[in-house]
Amino acid sequence: MQYDENLFFECRKKIEAKLGWGDSKKWTNTDFENLSEKVLSETGVNLSTSTLKRLWGKVKYDSVPQAATLNALARFAGYESFREYERVFKKRKQLKRRKQVSCSGRKFSAYYHSTRIYSQNPAFFIQYFLGHRFVYGY
């Protein structure tokens, strides 16, 4: 697995959003201890407070994180592994636009690429064919 700092930054943002603790720049040692406990309880992987502080930039760290550490954090963020997170992230990056669409009177945001629209609601996608909109559930 090749380490991509920008990709890891986005993974960290997902974790921060999941936790809802506010800006990580203001996190204290206690917050990192709590994060360590949460990661352990959800993934079974024990990441030390100092490791988490290094990864969040609280402590100077010039090395690349271990694959097991990246995998544990990706699993905590809701993905099977860091490799899966990378695959999903890159796929979303390829989707070029975001558009507000409505279906049965309900509005929702969707990402679209080419003629197929992928909804944030995983139950539907919309496909345009010769200017006509078709809504599918899956």
Image: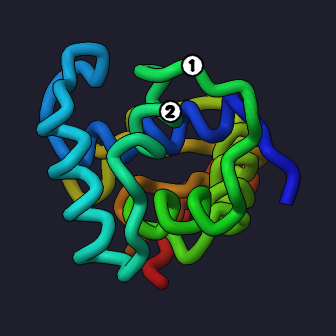
Residue 114 in the image: x percent, y percent? 78, 45
Residue 1 is left or right of residue 51, and the answer is: right
Vertical placement of residue 84 versus 60, above or below? below
Residue 122, relative to residue 102: is it above or below? below
Q: Where does label 2 land, which residue?
A: 54
Residue drawn at x 62%, y 30% as measured from the top left: 97
Q: Where is residue 10 shown, x and y percent of the image?
A: 54, 35
Residue type at mark 2: give it.
Arg
**Relative to 73, 88 lies left or right:** right
Q: Is residue 70 above or below residue 61?
A: below
Tell me which label, 2 or 1, sits earlier in the chain.
2
Element under label 2?
helix
Question: In this orientation, does residue 13 appear?
Answer: no
**Total marks placed:** 2
Q: Amino acid at mark 1?
A: Lys
Of the pair 30 and 70, the residue shown nearer to us:
30
Q: Secondary structure at mark 1?
A: loop
Determine the image quadrant of residue 112. Answer: top right
Q: Which mark is residue 136?
A: none
Residue 60, disc:
1
Going by the picture, which residue comes out furthest to the right? Answer: 2
Residue 1 drawn at (x, y percent): 85, 60
> Closest to the observer: 101 or 64?
64
